């Protein structure tokens, strides 16, 4: 055991230094470049910063950033006839800077060095009060290495333990698309010319870079999620947070458990989530009969066979529903999976202790999925497979879309967009600014530099003057690339289009490449989740299908700590708005949750482009009325369908004849949203039939595999459950799973 790790990781110092880690998918993403820029910023602000070790790999842009920074000379080790240069840990300690940059974290030191591994050098400095910035590529993380070797055939010799990443005070991913990385390689910015061709056909293949990219995004997202769950600020958000699905499968009988666990595994796998299996036992395990213990071992084996975490929970005189409810809260489940009650159990459903009834009444923020037991007939399955196709709007547009995504204002989307625009211009690409919002930020304004700006169009309306991008002038100028900021913006009345994303689409249709930016909270399908987390109404939104048009999606990742620091320095909002922002949208828990969502959202985009379609595609039927809360059901249904690569239907059962004027407006809003998500919209009248009957008949006719309905909102519904559509579907739709979406309102958290 090394001295550093033997001392208890990083906890052995009275005043431990801060650890910042930058993670990337591959060489050339800009980890060292970002670290050096941050080192220069800290130095300019008065911090004592030194370079302990940096590998520039001959990259001129990186070498230029070293100018003016103090470099501690390396220590030379001689091993046989070979000599090695390594960071001089003793010299750094004698110098005692506030911050030290130590590059190439995944490295084995030569014999004679103080420690075997470079990450142990970093720990040594941290324990002695020196803050460290360091970086490594994701394939070197211990939990990723084996998968990288298996999936990509890579030999990964150097390893960074997972506990090291968890000990970091701040972790950021440097996100670069495979296309950009390959272009950098061709331009000679990563390897010398003689190595480029071999790299393009091996490590830098598109599929390999995409896989490594999504792994880096998910690794940092998992780190964000773990930190948030352990933080004091977590209590500011009721229910599960983040975008990660956590599936909890409830089992009881071994003969039915295999089907349930397999269904849960498929859900978790396709939605990139975690899987738990829970069994509510009559007694503690040590008091079970031999037969009961044998059944438990069978269930546990089935769970572990599917890679699930096994949970045994004694009932101790509690209803099964209460046991499941408490476990769901403990593991932060987003979906609870149960088997469909046997036929003829409608009376049992009225009992307060029945698990389905209990969960329908008490579950908050968590969906309930009830798995049907009767399989589809071979004919229906064939029909479903032939008819199913992934619901993505693929339009062959002459222009290309590049999209920068962030978790919140101030992460640097516009700054990065302008920075890249200068690089494109230097390579001879004709790039202009159609619209850039600097929000009064001096650094962003300075970044515009000599980039050409197309004058904005001035629109007078209601006694005010608005400035919008001049689409006609952009088309007349016909650049190769135009920058169009603030994608989620609503244009002023009198503009050619209502929304800016429609402006962008118009330019792409005319053969102009567009670069734009948006924060993750503005995606249509995330509206309800973001409002739940932040308590803020999200009025400006961008359709998810539009994001899927982007040929490149780039995440600008910034930690909540850095974002709050920028806010306090006046780099995001004027001073009079800072206090209010910190108490609301910029609350640390809100920023962490939004960051996790952004990381996972971009990872899902990457995964969706490299994933193969499932052999058994699903068809999903979302059942809504024409009330405003139906929109939340459609958004949730679309996200499920998108992750499962399923076909989406939206069904409205009309019970009001004729519709009132308000119902007409609500109905049209529901229809518009369904069509925006590419769903097949179905309108069925309930003439001489109950709503439940219409739902089941429609589901059977369309051979759907999953029915999505909303959780009943009223609290006084116990005695009326048997007459509700949800009870009829539960008892009659044995051919499909019933997915009950949690009510999206902000209920008060119960004491139970």
Image (tube, rainbow, N blue to C red):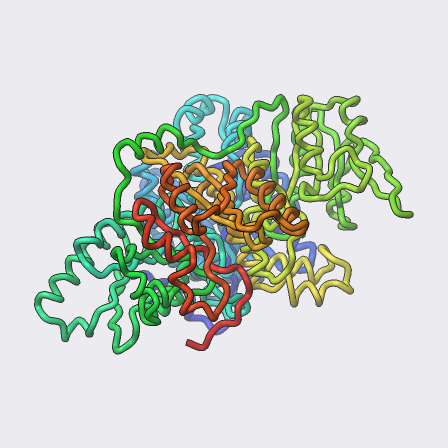
Between 164 and 258, the one lying in front of the other is 258
Between 76 and 129, the one lying in front of the other is 129
Residue at figure coordinates x 42%, y 44% from the top left: 215
Position of residue 431 measured from the top left corner of the image (x, y, whole percent): 71, 28
The residue sitting at the right extreme is 463
On the picture, is 625 further left or further right than 735?
right
Please state, as top left, top right, bottom left or bottom right, where the C terminus lies in the image: bottom left
Q: Can residue 23 be seen in the rendering of this structure?
A: no
Residue at figure coordinates x 56%, y 60% from the top left: 532
Please determine whether, in this image, residue 271 is positioned above or below residue 209. below
* Rendered image quadrant of residue 322: bottom left
Please determine whether, in this image, residue 90 is positioned above or below residue 747. above
Position of residue 629 measured from the top left corner of the image (x, y, whole percent): 56, 55
Q: Can residue 403 be seen in the rendering of this structure?
A: yes
Please state, as top left, top right, bottom left or bottom right, where the N terminus lies in the image: bottom left
* Rendered image quadrant of residue 311: bottom left
Number of labels in the image equals 0
Between 2 and 416, the one lying in front of the other is 416
Residue at figure coordinates x 77%, y 29% from the top left: 471
The residue sitting at the front extreme is 688
The residue sitting at the left extreme is 290
Position of residue 3 measured from the top left corner of the image (x, y, whole percent): 35, 64
Position of residue 416 measured from the top left corner of the image (x, y, whole percent): 65, 41
On the picture, is 135 further left or further right than 481?
left
């Amino acid at each position: 055991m090394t001295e550093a790790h033997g001392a208890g990781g990083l906890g052995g110092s009275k005043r431990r230094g801060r650890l910042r880690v930058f993670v990337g998918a591959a060489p050339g993403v800009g980890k060292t470049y970002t670290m050096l820029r941050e080192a220069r910023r800290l130095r300019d602000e008065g911090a004592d910063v030194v370079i302990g070790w940096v590998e520039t790999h001959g990259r001129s842009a990186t070498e230029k950033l070293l100018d003016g920074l103090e470099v501690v000379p390396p220590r030379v080790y001689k091993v046989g006839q070979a000599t090695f240069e390594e960071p001089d840990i003793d010299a750094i300690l004698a110098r005692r800077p506030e911050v030290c940059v130590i590059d190439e974290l995944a490295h084995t030191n030569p014999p004679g060095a103080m420690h075997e591994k470079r990450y142990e050098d970093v720990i040594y400095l941290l324990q002695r009060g020196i803050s460290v910035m360091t970086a490594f590529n994701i394939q070197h993380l211990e939990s990723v290495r084996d998968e990288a070797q298996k999936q990509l055939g890579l030999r990964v010799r150097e390893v960074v333990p997972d506990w090291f990443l968890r000990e970091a005070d701040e972790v950021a991913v440097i996100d670069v698309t495979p296309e950009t990385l390959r272009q950098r390689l061709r331009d000679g910015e990563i390897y010398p010319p003689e190595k480029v061709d071999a790299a393009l056909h091996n490590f830098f293949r598109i599929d390999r870079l995409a896989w490594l990219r999504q792994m880096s995004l998910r690794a940092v997202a998992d780190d964000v999620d773990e930190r948030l769950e352990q933080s004091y600020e977590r209590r500011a958000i009721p229910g599960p947070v983040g975008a990660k699905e956590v599936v909890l499968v409830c089992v009881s009988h071994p003969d039915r458990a295999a089907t349930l666990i397999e269904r849960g595994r498929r859900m978790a796998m396709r939605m990139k989530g975690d899987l738990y299996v829970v069994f509510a036992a009559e007694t503690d395990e040590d008091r079970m009969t031999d037969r009961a213990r044998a059944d438990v071992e069978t269930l546990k084996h089935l769970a572990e066979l599917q890679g699930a975490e096994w949970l045994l929970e004694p009932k101790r005189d509690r209803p099964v529903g209460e046991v499941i409810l408490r476990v769901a809260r403990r593991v932060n489940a987003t979906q609870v999976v149960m088997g469909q009650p046997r036929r003829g159990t409608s009376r049992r459903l009225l009992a307060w202790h029945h698990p389905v009834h209990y969960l329908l009444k008490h579950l908050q923020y968590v969906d309930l999925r009830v798995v049907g037991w009767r399989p589809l007939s071979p004919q229906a399955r064939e029909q479903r497979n032939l008819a199913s196709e992934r619901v993505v709007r693929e339009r062959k547009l002459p222009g290309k879309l590049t999209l920068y995504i962030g978790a919140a204002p101030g992460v640097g989307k516009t700054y990065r967009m302008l920075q890249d625009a200068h690089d494109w211009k230097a390579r001879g690409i004709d790039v202009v600014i159609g619209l850039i919002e600097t929000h009064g930020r001096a650094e962003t304004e300075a970044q515009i530099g000599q980039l050409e700006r197309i004058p904005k169009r001035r629109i007078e309306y209601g006694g005010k003057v608005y400035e919008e991008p001049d689409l006609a002038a952009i088309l007349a100028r016909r650049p190769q690339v135009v920058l169009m900021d603030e994608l989620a913006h609503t244009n002023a009345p009198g503009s050619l289009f209502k929304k800016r994303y429609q402006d962008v689409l118009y330019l792409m249709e005319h053969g102009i490449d567009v670069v734009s930016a948006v924060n993750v909270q503005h995606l249509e399908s995330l509206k309800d989740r973001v409002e739940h987390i932040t308590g803020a109404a999200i009025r400006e939104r961008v359709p998810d299908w539009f994001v899927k048009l982007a040929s490149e999606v780039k995440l600008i990742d910034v930690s909540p700590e850095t974002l709050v620091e920028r806010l306090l320095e006046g780099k995001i909002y004027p001073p009079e708005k800072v206090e209010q922002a910190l108490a609301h949208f910029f609350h640390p828990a809100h920023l962490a949750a939004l960051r996790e969502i952004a990381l996972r959202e971009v990872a899902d985009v990457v995964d969706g482009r490299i994933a193969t379609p499932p052999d058994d595609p699903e068809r999903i039927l979302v059942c809504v009325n024409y009330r405003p809360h139906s929109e939340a059901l459609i958004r949730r249904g679309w996200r499920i369908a998108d992750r499962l690569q399923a076909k989406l239907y939206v069904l409205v059962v009309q019970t009001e004849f004729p519709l009132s004027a308000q119902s007409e407006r609500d109905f049209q809003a529901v229809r518009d949203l369904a069509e925006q998500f590419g769903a097949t919209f179905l309108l069925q009248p309930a003439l001489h039939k109950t709503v439940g009957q219409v739902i089941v008949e429609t589901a059977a006719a369309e051979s759907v595999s999953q029915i999505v309905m909303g959780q009943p909102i009223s609290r006084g519904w116990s005695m009326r459950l048997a007459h509700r559509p949800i009870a009829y579907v539960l008892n009659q739709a044995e051919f499909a799973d019933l997915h009950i979406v949690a009510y999206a309102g902000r209920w008060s958290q119960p004491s139970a």
